[in-house]
Image (tube, coloured by chain):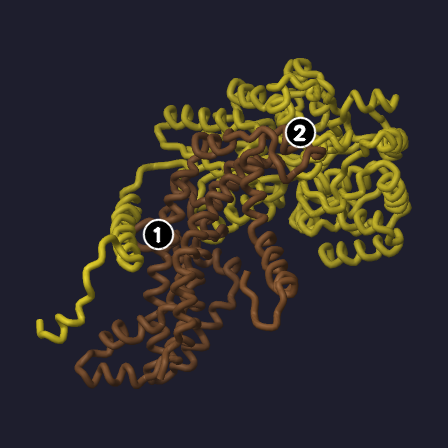
Amino acid sequence: MEIRVGETYFQRLIIFYIPLFMFLVAMLFPFYWMLITSIKPDAELYNVRSIPFLVKEPTLEHWKFLFQETLFGRWALNTLWIATATTVVSLICGVCAAYALSRLRFFGSTTIGVSIFVTYLVPPTLLFIPLSQVIANFPLFNLYDTPWSLILTYPTLLVPFSTWLLMGYFKTIPKELEECARIDGASRIQAMIRIVLPLAAPGILSAAIFSFTLAWNEFLYALVFLSSPLQKTIPVGVVSELIKGDVFFWGALMAGALFGSVPVAIVYSFFVEHYVSGIAGAVKG
Amino acid sequence: MDKQTETTKVAWQPGMSRREFIKTTSGLAVAAGAGWGMFGQAPAFAQERELHILEWSSFVKPADVETDRQAAEFGKQEGIKVRVEHINANDLNARATAAVESGAGPDLIRLLGNQPHVYAKGLIDHGDLIQEVGGETIWPSLRDGVNVNGVYRGVPYFFGGGAYVYRRDLFDEAKVGPPQTWDQFMDVGKKVKDLGYPIGQSLGHSFGDPPGFCYTLLWSFGGSLIDKNAKVSIDSQATRDSIKYLAEFWKSACDESGLAWDDTSNNRAFLGETISCTLNGASIYFVAKQNWEKKQDPFVKQLDHFLSPEGPAGRFHTISGQNSCIMTHSKVQSAAKNYIRFIHKEENFEKFFVINNGYIIGVVPKWREHDLWSRDPALTPYRDLGTYGQHIGYPGPYDRRSQEVFAKYIIVDLYARAVKGESPDSVIKWAESELKNIYS
C-alpha cells in the first residue's frame, strides 16, 4: 500500500482504499448480479427466502436456451457489424465536419456549427417517424429490414455530438503545426491526416467509444426498421424473445444482457489506456 | 528513399500492434458488410409477393408455433410467402405508428384493444370480414374496439382477461374459500394476511393488472369514469364507496408494496410464494405448470382461479381483444383478407384455441361451450370472462379518449393516491379535472 509523506496507513485506508473499494463494488455489482441470475435455476430465482447473492445449484440451462433456442448468436453479429460500421461512418463525417468548422473560414460557418449542435438536442423518439418514411421510400434499394437502415440513420444521432467534441480538440491544436507541414509541401488533407488527426487521437477515441456504445445499445430505431428475426440486434431480439406478456425469462435475459455488455467492456478496456495517456501527454508548445 | 527516411524506420516488431489490428479488422468488416448489406437484400423492384404479419409474442410458446404453422399452410394454399413477426406487446404501438405514418411495413398488424381507433387512418374497411366472422354475435365490447364511426377497422381474433389465481392450500389453512363478493374478499384477505400470505395487487403503471383491477372495482360499486354519453361522472357516491373499500382492503389484506409493482411483480411474488392470491391472466398458472411440475412440486396442484367479486352493481371484468388489422399501404390486401378468413375457419381456430389452453377465448359466445373448459377445472373461470367483460370505455364509447385515459393511468392513480392517504374528495377532484381535459 503506497502512502504519502505525513500520511498514516490508516488515513490512506479511510480516505482512499475504502471509498475506492465501495466504488468498485457499486460499479461491478450489476455484472455480478447478471452472472448470478444467469446461472440460477428458475426455482431458486423465484425462491425469495434464499440468499439472493449466492447460487446453490448453478446451471447452464439459461445460456443453452439463449444460444440454442433463440438467434442470439446472429443478433450479436448483427449488432457488432452495425455498431462498427456506424462508428466508422460517424467518425468520418464528424472529423470532416469538425475540421472544416474549426479550421476553415467560410460564410455561415458559425451558423452551421450551431445548427449541427442544435440537431443533437432533438430527441430521437421524434425522429423515428420521418426517418421511417425516408427508409421506406429510399430510391432503388429497399433499406427496410436491412442493417443499412440503421447504419445510415444512427449517424443522425452521432455525427452532431462527434462534430462538437472534435471541434473542441481541433481548436486546441496549434495552427502553426499545420502551417509548417504545408510550408514543407503537404496539402491540406495531408496535413490534416498526418498532423491533426494523430494529435486529436484522444478526442477521436472518445467520439468512437460514444458512437459504438450508443449504436450497440440503441433500441427504438432497431425495433422500427428491422423486422426479420435474422436481422435483429441484441436489444430488440432479446426483448422480443425473452419477454412474453408478463412472463420474463429472467435467467436468459440476464445471460443476454451480460453477453451483450462484454464487447463494449472490451472496447473500453482496449482504448482507455491510450485515451488517458493521450490526455496526460497533451500537446506541448 | 533517402538516408534520413531510412534512419527513421522503426525496427520491425513481432506480432500485430493494436493500431494495425483495428485497421485490418475494420477494413475487413466494412468490406464484408458492404457486400452483405448491399447485396443481401434484393432491389425493391425485384422482390417476390409477401404477406408480412406483425403480432405480439405470446408466453404460450406453442401458440406462436401454431400461428406460424397456420401462416405457412395458408401461404402454400394462396401461393404467397407469409412472414409472421412476433414482438413484445409493449412495442406494437411504436411499430404501428411507424407503419401508419411512413406508409410502409407490415401488411397486417394484430392491434390490441381499441388501438384500431388510434390508427384508423392507416387501416382498411373490414366490414365484409366482420360479417363472415360473426357479425352481431361477436361480443359487443370487442366489436366496439374495431368499430370506428361505423366502419370496422379490424377483425377481432381472440380476447383475454384476468381472473384471480389463488393457493387452495393457504385458503384451506385460513379456513376460507373463493369469495363471491367484495365484503367476502375483505374477510378472506384479512385471514390470509394474518397467515403471512397477503393478497397481491399492483397499483403501478403497467397496462395489464392495475387497470384490470381498478376498472372492475369501480364498475362493480356502480361508479364509472364517464357515462354512456361520454360525460365525466367520476364524482359520485359509488366512487367514494369504492375508494373507502379499497383503502381498508389495502391495509388489512394486501401486500402494501404493490404500489410499486408492475405486471410482472405479482407473477414473481406469487411464484415466490409470498402472496396467496392475485389478479392475473393465466400466465402464472402456465409458468408454474411448466417449471414446477417438472420437479413434481405439489405447488401447481394447489392453484385455482375465481372470478372478480360482485359488488352492489354486479360483477365485471375488463377484457381486451387482439384484432387483425390490414393496413391501407398493403399491396396484398386480398391475400390478407383471405388469411383472416383462413384463421377464423372453425377447424383452424379450434387448433389455436386448444393450444392456448384457456389463456385466450374466441370472440363469439359459442367457444364457451367447448369441452376444453372441462379438461382443466382450474381454468374454467376464464370461460365466463366474455359474459362479464367490458371494455375500458364502459359505459361510454370505446374511443381514442378512453384509450388516452387508459394510457395516462388516471383510474390507477386515483386509487393509488387514495390508499396512500389522500382524501377521497381530493383524489376525485384531481381525476375529474384530468378527465375533463380529455373529454372536453
Mark 1 vs mark 2, CA separation in Å: 41 Å
The chain that appears yellow in the image is B
Residue lying at 65% horizontally and 20% vertically, measured from the top left: B366
Q: Tell me, yes or no, if residue B277 can be seen here.
A: yes
Does residue B119 sit above or below B74 in this rendering? below
Work out which quarter of the rendered image holds the N terminus of chain A and state it. Answer: bottom right
Does residue B255 sit above or below A285 in this rendering? above
The chain that appears brown in the image is A
Q: Which residue is mark 2?
A: B284
Q: Which residue is mark 1?
A: A148
The residue type indicated by label 1 comes to Trp
Across and down, in percent, residue B224 comes to: 80, 44
Protein chain holding label 2? B
Nearer-the-camera pick, B135 or A123: A123
Residue B354 placement, left or right of B421: left
Does residue B119 sit above or below B320 in this rendering? below
Residue B204 placement, left or right of A275: right
